[in-house]
Amino acid sequence: MTLKHLNQSELAHRWGISPRTLERWRWIGQGPAFLKIGGRVVYRLEDVEAYEAKKKQEMAR
């Protein structure tokens, strides 16, 4: 099983937002789950997709 991870820049590009926005979200406890490995922040693709699905459901209400 291969896990895919996105770094902050890749996720910011995917969503069309600033990397600073992701930093701020982490600081205030928002956004998708993330891992900090050796001082490096990464997002598991599976967590990103789950977060996107959750937001899509919230918008449909």
Image (cartoon, grey):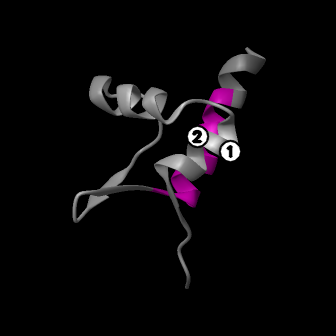
Magenta residues, start to end = 43-55
Q: Residue at x 68, y 33 (%)?
A: 16
Q: What element carries label 2?
A: helix
Out of 3 and 54, give the one closest to the viewer: 3
| The disc label shown at residue 14, or none | 1
Q: Residue furthest bottom?
A: 1
* Horizontal and vertical percent position of residue 14: 68, 44
Out of 29 and 56, give the one closest to the viewer: 29
Q: Residue at x 65, y 43 (%)?
A: 13
Contact (Cβ within 8 Å) of mark 2 with mark 1: yes
Tag 2 residue: 12
Q: Residue at x 67, y 37 (%)?
A: 15
Marks 2/1: CA–CA distance? 5 Å
Work out which quarter of the rendered image holds the C terminus and state it: top right
Helix, strand or loop: magenta stretch:
helix
* Horizontal and vertical percent position of residue 44: 49, 59
